[in-house]
């Protein structure tokens, strides 16, 4: 190695004498701090993460499907309710038309009298002049 490289390495390394320790370094390894080594290849962890992501996406898709089906059922129920209301109103309209037909004779007499209205009705019922009752 060249001296330039050695100097560069020493510049980037912290000086061990500059480090201030509050506590002395332990001389033995405590039981709770046993070093562990992960021998599982990184691809296994990547597959686990991918599987977890896939499960979350599938759960989201299932929730979306349930929401769409629920909305479809709600719209079908609303349409059925509207149909029944429409049917009831049509029946009511037919009943009113039938009631109106009962009074068709009154309408024909009214038309025969020349469209007499409440305003000129007193004129029609007025007694001729000169007749006393």
Image: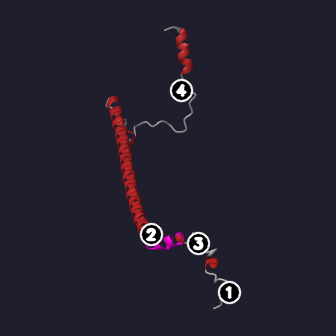
Look at mark 1 in the image and give the residue it sits on. Answer: 130
The label shown at residue 116 is 3
Query: Which residue does the image show at 42% across and 67% down from the upper left?
Result: 92
Q: Is residue 66 visible?
A: yes
Residue 48 x %, y %: 33, 36
Front of the two marks 3 and 2: 3
Look at mark 4 in the image and give the residue it sits on. Answer: 16
- Badge 1 vs badge 2, beta-carbon distance below 8 Å: no
C-alpha gap between disc 3 and disc 2: 24 Å
Structure colour scheme:
secondary structure
Q: Residue furthest bottom?
A: 133
First in residue order: circle 3 vs circle 2: 2
Circle 2 SS class:
helix
C-alpha gap between disc 4 and disc 2: 103 Å
Circle 1 SS class:
loop
Which secondary structure is most common in the magenta stretch?
helix
Residue 105 x %, y %: 46, 73
Nearer-the-camera pick, 132 or 40:
132
- Badge 4 vs badge 1, beta-carbon distance below 8 Å: no
Front of the two marks 4 and 1: 1
Segment colored magenta: 100-111
Query: Mark 4: few, some, or many residues within 10 Å (few <14, many ≥20)?
Result: few
Front of the two marks 4 and 3: 3
Nearer-the-camera pick, 92 or 108:
108
């Amino acid at each position: 190695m060249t001296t330039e490289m050695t100097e560069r390495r020493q510049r980037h390394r912290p000086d061990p004498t500059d480090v201030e320790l509050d506590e002395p370094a332990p001389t033995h390894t405590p039981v709770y701090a046993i070093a562990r080594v992960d021998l599982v290849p990184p691809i296994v962890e990547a597959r686990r993460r991918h599987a977890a992501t896939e499960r979350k996406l599938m759960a989201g898709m299932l929730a979306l499907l349930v929401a769409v089906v629920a909305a479809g059922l709600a719209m079908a129920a609303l349409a059925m309710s509207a149909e029944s209301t429409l049917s009831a109103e049509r029946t009511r309209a037919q009943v009113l038309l039938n009631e109106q037909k009962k009074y068709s004779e009154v309408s024909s007499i009214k038309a025969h009298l020349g469209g007499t209205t409440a305003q000129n009705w007193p004129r029609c019922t007025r007694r001729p002049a000169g007749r006393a009752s």
